[in-house]
Image (spheres, rainbow, N blue to C red):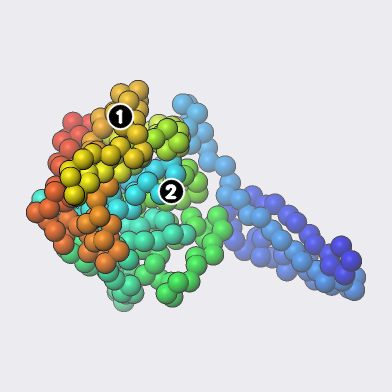
Amino acid sequence: EEDTLTVQMSLTTADLKVPQKIKADSEAALEGLGKKVVVRIDVQAPAQPVGATGAPAMATTAIEGVKHIIAVASGKGGVGKSTVAANLAVALERSGASVGLCDCDLYGPSIGLMFGTQERPLADSESGKIQPVERYGLRLMSMGFLLEDGAPAVLRGPMVTKYTQQFLRQVDWGDLDYLVLDLPPGTGDIQLTIVQTVSLAGALIVTTPQEVALIDARKAVSMFHKVNVPVLGLVENMSYFLCPSDGKRYDIFGTGGGQREADRLGVPLLAQIPIEIITREAGDQGLPVTASAPDSEAAEHFVKLAESLRQVLEKTAAPC
């Protein structure tokens, strides 16, 4: 195009040196044409071997010292998944368990804000492992701790895989009863990397009651089924709103959607969590409501969710 020559390639490789060399060699071969040369390479990971069920054949293993790894997922954004994950982790810790929380949403990390910290994690000089940030008795890891304030994470497939694996394998999580993974919305690279890297005890699917959210929640459930990860249950967030002035209930996003979907999928509806101003304010202030107001009705919903999760794990999921 005019003074610019653009070359677009698509490569399938797990070795990052390969596209780097091809790009450099291509630019060198074309530089004598008297045009500006732009070489773009789209790198894709090699296809995984397929098992007998049609799902990717995975050699997942446990994280040393961690009993249960729980994925908190959603089919779409905006359903309050990170709020649920943060308060669930605090509620589990308040029950006497040792808990870690890994923010696996590399593009939109929010756990640092919700816990009021942007502390940079340090690496242990002997083991080389990253030391998680500690807050409210939890061990935390997030891409937000590694970025400058407001800086975006500009990552493509191989780097996304690398960082996700580092967060799981190269962080010194220590001995934990629960490691809660706050997944990004959707069914992309990060989710597949996680299910192919570590043995999950199961997944919680967060949705809101309306059909437009349930459509995407089904996709998340389907993904976990295909990779043989048990779905422990659904959490219906923003289930309803109780007006503070008169106590009247408003079903802003409809009613009954979470229960109907749970019945259809054959999994329990673990919680119906209402919209509450105190929960939003606490998250914005870096004080999860289960930590800042543990005796409030808002916190009680997450405490009950934690108890329901423990009961489901006792019945259906063995420790990792």
Quadrant where the C terminus sits is top left
Residue at the spot 45% in from the left edge and 36% down from the top edge: 212
Label 1 Cα crowd, 10 Å radius (few <14 / some 14-19 / many 20+): some
Q: Amino acid at mark 2?
A: Gly
- Residue 123 in view, yes or no: no
- Give x and y (percent) for residue 177: 18, 50
Label 2 Cα crowd, 10 Å radius (few <14 / some 14-19 / many 20+): some
Q: Which mark is residue 256?
A: 1
Q: Which mark is residue 77?
A: 2
Q: CA distance from mark 2 to mark 1?
A: 20 Å
Nearest to the observer: residue 143 or residue 164: 143
Lower sequence index among marks 2 and 1: 2
- Give x and y (percent) for residue 281: 26, 61
Q: Which mark is residue 108?
A: none
Nearest to the observer: residue 272 or residue 151: 272
Residue at the spot 33% in from the left edge and 53% down from the top edge: 82
Residue at the spot 26% in from the left edge and 32% down from the top edge: 269
> Judging from the image, what secondary structure is the residue with disc 2 in?
loop
**Horizontal relation, residue 270 to residue 186: left or right:** left
**Measured along the vertical axis of the image, is residue 301 above or below residue 100?**
above
Task: Give the number of the mark in front: 2 or 1.
Answer: 1
Query: How many numbered tags mark residues here?
Result: 2
- Give x and y (percent) for residue 121: 32, 72
Quadrant where the N terminus sits is bottom right
Q: Amino acid at mark 1?
A: Gly
User: Where on the picture, by quarter, is residue 241?
Assistant: top left
User: Where on the picture, by quarter, is residue 115?
Assistant: bottom left
> Judging from the image, what secondary structure is the residue with disc 1 in?
loop
- Residue 187 in view, yes or no: yes
**Measured along the vertical axis of the image, is residue 123 above or below residue 57?**
below
Residue at the spot 29% in from the left edge and 71% down from the top edge: 117
- Give x and y (percent) for residue 232: 28, 35
